Image (cartoon, helix red, strand yellow):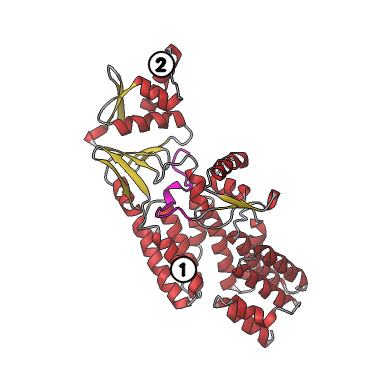
Amino acid sequence: MDSLITAAARALAMGDPFGALNRVALREDAPALALRGIAMGQLGDFAKAKSLLRRAARAFGPREAMARARCVVAEAEVALVSRDLAFPTKELAAARAVLEAHGDNTNAAHAGYLEARRLLLIGRLDEAERRLARLDPAPFPPALRVAHELALAGIAMRRIRAKTARTALDSARDAARRAGIPALAAEVETAAATLSAPAARLIAREGERTLRLDQVEALLDSGALIIDACRNAVRQKDRIVSLSRRPVLFALARALGEAWPQDVPRAVLLAKAFGARFADESHRARLRVEIGRLRRLLRGIAAVNATPEGFAIAPRAGADIAVLARPVDEDHAPTLAVLADGESWSSSALALALGASQRTVQRALDDLAAAGKVQFFGRGRARRWVMPPLPGFATPLLLPASLPGD
C-alpha cells in the first residue's frame, strides 16, 4: 500500500473525508476507489458512495478476498446510514466470516455492530443483544467502543432501562473523547439528550404530567397497574398483558383506567371502543362480550365490575391505576418516532422498522405530508421521507419493541 493510500485511510479513520479525497480523488485503482467511496459516504452522498464501493469490490482481484469483504462491510454501513434496511444481510455475514478467517478482527467486529444496529432499528432487541454479547469491545479502537455502547444504550432505552442506558452513554462519551472524532461525540450527545426529554405522559387521579424515561422506569417498578398506551398493554411489575392485537379491548381498558376510581357510562365505552354514535341492542350485546374478554385477560391483576351506569375497573391488592400515554397526541406517532432520527427513509424501510405493511405506512405518510409534518424528495423507488426531530420529546416509547404475548 503506497503512502497516499495510507494517509487517506488515516484521514478517514479520524473523520476527515476531505483530507482523504485530497489524496485519492483522481485515482481509479481499487484501494483508491474504496477510500473514495467511504469518504463520499461520510459526506452524505450515499448513491455515489455505493457506486464507488461496488466498483472497488469488482476491481480487487480474486485473491484479495479480505479487501472485497471490507468493501461489502463499508457498503453495508452506507446502506444502514441511508436507512436501506433491506440490504443483503447474508452478504454482510459472509464478509464478516472472511474477515475473521483472515484475522481482521477489527473490521469483523465492525460488521457485527452493523448487524446489531440493523436489528435494533427494526425492533428485534433479543437478536441484537445476542449479537452484541458475542463482541468484546475491550481490544478494539475507541470508535468501535462507541458503537458498542450506543447499541447497548439503544436496547436499554427501548426496554425502558434508564439506568443501564445512562451507564452505556457515559462509557460511549468517554470512548468518543478518546477517539477524537467530532461526529461520534455529537451522536453520543444526541442519544444522551433523550434521557432528559419527556418520554411519556402520566394520566392519574392527581392529573396529567410528563415523565422522563427514568421516571417511566420507576413507575413500572412501583407496583401500580399501568394501562400502557405506548405499547398497548396492561402491566403490573413483571405481569404484562399485551393488547397490541386487540385494539377494542385496549380502548376499553384505557377508558376505564382514565376514569378510575369512577365508572364509565356504557354510551362512552361504546363511543370509544366502537365509534358508535347511537347505541342499539346489538352494540350493547357486543360491549358485554368484549368486557367479558377483558375480564378474562386481566384476571389476577384487576377486576372489571358492572355498575348501574356502566363499568369500572378495580385493581387487585389495592394498587393504584395510571395510564401511560404517548408524549404527543398523534395518530401516526410511531411513524414520526422513526423519522425523528433525522435520516431519510424509504417507505419500504419504514414498513420493515414498524412491522407494518408498506401500504399502511404509505397511507400514514400521505396523511402526515398533507398535514405538513413530513416532507419527501425523489420519485418512485427513489423517494425518501424526512422530518426534523420532534422538539423536546424523546421517542423510545413510540418505537417498536415486542412484548410477551405479541
The image's mark for residue 372 is none
Dot 2 falls on a residue whose secondary structure is: helix
User: Furthest-left residue in view?
Assistant: 318
Near-viewer residue (86 or 301)? 86
Please tell me which residue is depicted at 56% across the width and 67% down the height of the picture.
110
Describe residue 174's horizontal placement relative to residue 351 as left or right. Answer: left
The image's mark for residue 186 is 1
Q: Residue 230, relative to residue 296: is it above or below? A: below
Q: Which amino acid, by three-letter code, is at mark 2?
A: Arg
Horizontal and vertical percent position of residue 76? 63, 62
| Location of residue 296 (image quadrant) | top left
Q: Residue 58, relative to residue 13: is it above or below? A: above
Please tell me which residue is depicted at 43% across the width and 26% down the height of the picture.
273
Q: Is residue 187 magenta?
A: no
Foreground label between 1 and 2? 1
User: Furthest-top residue in view?
Assistant: 281
**Sooner in the amino-acid sequence: mark 1 or mark 2:** 1
Q: Residue 129, relative to residue 225: is it above or below? A: below
Near-viewer residue (370 or 278)? 370
User: Range of the magenta residues?
Assistant: 389-406
Q: Name the residue under label 2.
A: 284
Please tell me which residue is depicted at 63% across the width and 60% down the height of the picture.
79
Horizontal and vertical percent position of residue 120? 51, 54
What's the magenta bit mostly, secondary-structure-wise? loop
Horizontal and vertical percent position of residue 299? 34, 29
**Is residue 10 among the parts visible in the rendering?**
yes
Please tell me which residue is depicted at 61% across the width and 47% down the height of the picture.
347
Describe residue 29's horizontal placement relative to residue 396 as left or right. Answer: right
